[in-house]
Image (tube, helix red, strand yellow):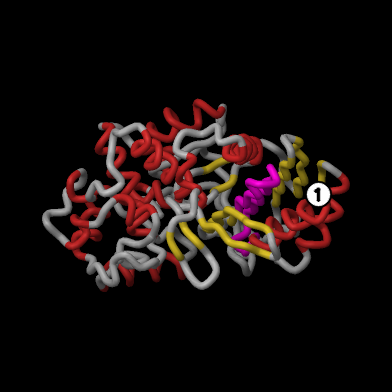
């Protein structure tokens, strides 16, 4: 998700094993038992919150280690949208075409609410042979497949067909549009909106939204795919609202605690409103599942070399954030830690 990349901080040679652990010993013991089956390498951070008490477990990392959080960014975009609706600045049924140059295309009539909840009918990624071939080639070469500028993103949206509008179908293409629509509405860039409405109020001083490789420091961390192959850093360009944030365990702990406290404008985004599949419900960006009697509000993320998971037990005032620089599924770690909490209450 982003613009053309140079090889920023790409490491050569074999992928290192998971680093040594530091932090809360009890949490480390539990994470040790969970992480073996996941295949995480190099760096992993787990933050556990319960009743405002924080515990950390870091492997080869620390509270300030930078990770790409991928699609967890969508939850932040959804807060911006819900805040705009709550304040009366926008309506939920505001159409994308009223704010973005979509030229009377199918996408122009889709509402921001439909985009924010993956019910727009837009495809998951851009259609068209050139876009698909380019994305496949980038993935095979372990490069960033999301290279669209804003004009490119809008061209992709204009050419896309809307199918089964109103039904849930996860779309990165669709999820990028609300953030760009909000940016147009506020006459600002998307990163500026996040800093103004989320990062600065919550004290998330280490969180950034690099749009191009030039926005990254020379030592910007990169990660590994599930097989241990080095991946380039992903900057997101126009797709930033769908997955462009880089953050740290410290900042994500602040984010999760603010969500538990309902201390973030736009928290109505977390409210489940529509069926996503046979088990999940979806609000604006956020999913809610009932798992073994526990209601979990969550979103995960993955880029070429990173993975993330944020899971909230809003009733039990608990949250788990899991971040890794290996692109493997982290969901089970977060969910099982929340279930431990429920059983211990």
Q: Is residue 204 left or right of residue 108?
A: right
Q: Is residue 184 above or below residue 45?
A: above
Q: In the rendered structure, does residue 322 fall within the stretch colored magenta?
A: yes
Where, by quadrant of the figure, is residue 159 drawn?
bottom left
Q: Which residues are magenta?
A: 309-330
Q: Give the labeled residue for mark 1.
A: 345
Where, by quadrant of the figure, is residue 133 drawn?
bottom left
Q: Which residue shows up at 46% across the image and 70% down it?
A: 140
Q: Position of residue 191 (x, y in %)?
A: 40, 36
Q: Position of residue 269 (x, y in %)?
A: 45, 46
Q: Which residue shows up at 30% across the image and 32% down it?
A: 188
Q: Which residue shows up at 31% across the image and 40% down it?
A: 182
Q: Nearer the viewer, residue 170 or 241?
A: 170
Q: Position of residue 329 (x, y in %)?
A: 62, 64
Q: Quadrant of the N terminus?
A: bottom left
Q: Which residue shows up at 42% across the image and 46% down it?
A: 78
Determine the secondary structure under disc 1: loop
Q: In the rendered structure, does residue 193 fall within the stretch colored magenta?
A: no
- Quick one: which residue is furthest to the left in this view? 104
Q: Is residue 226 above or below residue 248?
A: below
Q: Nearer the viewer, residue 247 or 257?
A: 257
Q: Is residue 242 above or below residue 274?
A: above
The reply to whether residue 4 is in sight is no
């Amino acid at each position: 998700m982003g613009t053309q990349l140079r090889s920023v901080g790409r490491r050569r040679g074999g992928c290192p094993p998971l680093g040594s652990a530091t932090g809360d010993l009890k949490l480390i013991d539990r994470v040790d038992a969970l992480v073996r089956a996941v295949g995480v390498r190099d760096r992993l951070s787990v933050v556990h919150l319960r009743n405002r008490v924080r515990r950390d477990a870091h492997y080869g990392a620390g509270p300030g280690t930078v990770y790409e959080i991928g699609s967890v960014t969508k939850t932040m975009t959804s807060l911006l949208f819900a805040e705009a609706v709550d304040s009366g600045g926008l309506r939920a049924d505001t159409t994308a075409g009223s704010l973005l140059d979509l030229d009377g295309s199918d996408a122009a009539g889709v509402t921001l609410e439909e985009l924010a909840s993956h019910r727009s009918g837009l495809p998951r990624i851009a259609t068209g042979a050139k876009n698909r071939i380019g994305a496949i080639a980038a993935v095979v070469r372990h490069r960033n497949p999301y290279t669209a500028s804003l004009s490119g993103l809008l061209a992709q949206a204009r050419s896309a067909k809307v199918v089964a509008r109103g039904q849930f179908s996860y779309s990165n293409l669709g999820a990028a549009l609300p953030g760009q629509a909000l940016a147009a509405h506020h006459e600002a860039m998307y990163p500026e909106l996040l800093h103004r409405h989320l990062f600065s109020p919550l004290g998330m001083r280490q969180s950034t939204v690099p749009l191009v490789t030039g926005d990254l420091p020379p030592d910007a961390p990169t990660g590994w795919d599930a097989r241990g192959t080095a991946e380039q850093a992903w900057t997101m360009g126009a797709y930033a609202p769908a997955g462009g944030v880089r953050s740290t365990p410290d900042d994500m702990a602040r984010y999760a605690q603010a969500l538990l406290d309902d201390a973030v404008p736009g928290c109505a985004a977390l409210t489940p409103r529509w069926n996503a599949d046979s088990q999940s419900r979806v609000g604006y960006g956020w999913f809610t599942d009932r798992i073994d009697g526990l209601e979990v509000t969550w979103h995960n993320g993955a880029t070429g070399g990173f993975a993330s998971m944020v899971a909230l037990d809003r009733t039990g005032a608990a949250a788990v954030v899991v971040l890794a620089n290996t692109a493997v599924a982290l969901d089970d770690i977060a969910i099982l830690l929340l279930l431990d909490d429920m059983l211990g209450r």
